[in-house]
């Protein structure tokens, strides 16, 4: 399993608790409406302006095949390859230290395509999935 540098950002997307490597996260922003891009995949909510930079905004619920929330809570702004990408989430839960020994192989996950998950873990009473950003974003943003 890859080294996660010990810190993960836990977020809730619909009924799932997901984690992203802390090193990939630039900042947490309040939710904002995106300008839709004609012909873009459904999971691409559109573009937002972050201090003069156009950023692709990805709908977290649609990306993970979950029911759309009634209200989106925040945008997690991340660095993916050489671009900034925003991911809508229902709630930012915590920034937690997670030893790699506490993570299980992605094959142990039930109910989500293991190809988009790097690992499964527990923090306290929470089970979470560490998302594979390359597997999730590449089909959307490199077409």
Image: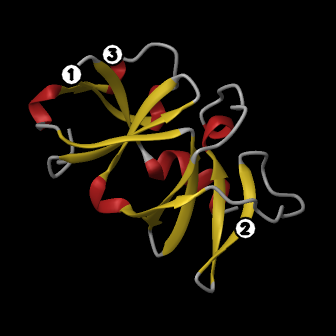
Residue furthest right as drawn: 38
Question: Which label sits in the foreground, 3 or 2?
Answer: 2
The quadrant holding residue 71 is top right
Figure disc tally: 3
> Circle 3 is placed at which residue position?
108
Whole-Å distance between the Cαs marked 1 and 2? 36 Å
92 above or below 87?
above
Q: Nearer the viewer, residue 37 or 31?
A: 31
Name the residue located 50 percent from the left edge and 46 percent from the top edge.
Answer: 135
Q: Which residue occupies 90% across, 62% down?
A: 38
**How far across and how far down the image is residue 41, in percent?**
78, 50
Q: Mark 2 = which residue?
A: 47
| Residue at disc 2, secondary structure | strand
Residue 67: quadrant of the picture: top right
Q: Which mark is residue 57?
A: none
Q: In the depicted view, which residue is nearer to us: 36 or 82?
A: 36
What residue is rendered at 45% in x and 27% in y?
114
Left/right placement of residue 17 relative to residue 39 reads: left
Q: Are marks 3 and 1 in contact (CB under 8 Å)?
A: no
Nearest the viewer among 34 and 30 is 30
Residue 46, percent from left and from top:
75, 61
Which residue, given by chain and number where applicable, does mark 1 sit on? Answer: 124
How many residues crowd mark 2 within 10 Å: few (<14), some (14–19), many (20+)? many
Along the polypeptide, which appears first: circle 3 or circle 2?
2
Q: Residue furthest bottom?
A: 52
How far apart in space, not on screen, are marks 3 and 2 (Cα)? Answer: 35 Å
Disc with the residue nearer the chain's start (1 vs 2): 2
């Amino acid at each position: 399993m890859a080294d996660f540098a010990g810190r993960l950002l836990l977020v809730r997307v619909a009924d799932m608790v997901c984690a992203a490597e802390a090193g990939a996260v630039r900042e947490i922003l309040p939710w904002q409406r995106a300008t839709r891009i004609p012909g873009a995949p459904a999971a691409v909510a559109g573009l937002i302006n972050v201090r003069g930079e156009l950023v692709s905004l990805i709908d977290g619920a649609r990306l993970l095949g979950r029911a759309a929330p009634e209200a989106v809570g925040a945008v997690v702004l991340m660095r993916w390859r050489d671009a900034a990408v925003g991911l809508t989430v229902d709630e930012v839960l915590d920034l937690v230290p997670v030893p790699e020994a506490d993570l299980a192989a992605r094959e142990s996950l039930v109910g989500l395509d293991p190809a988009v998950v790097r690992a499964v873990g527990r923090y306290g009473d929470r089970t979470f999935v560490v998302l594979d950003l390359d597997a999730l974003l590449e089909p959307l943003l490199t077409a």
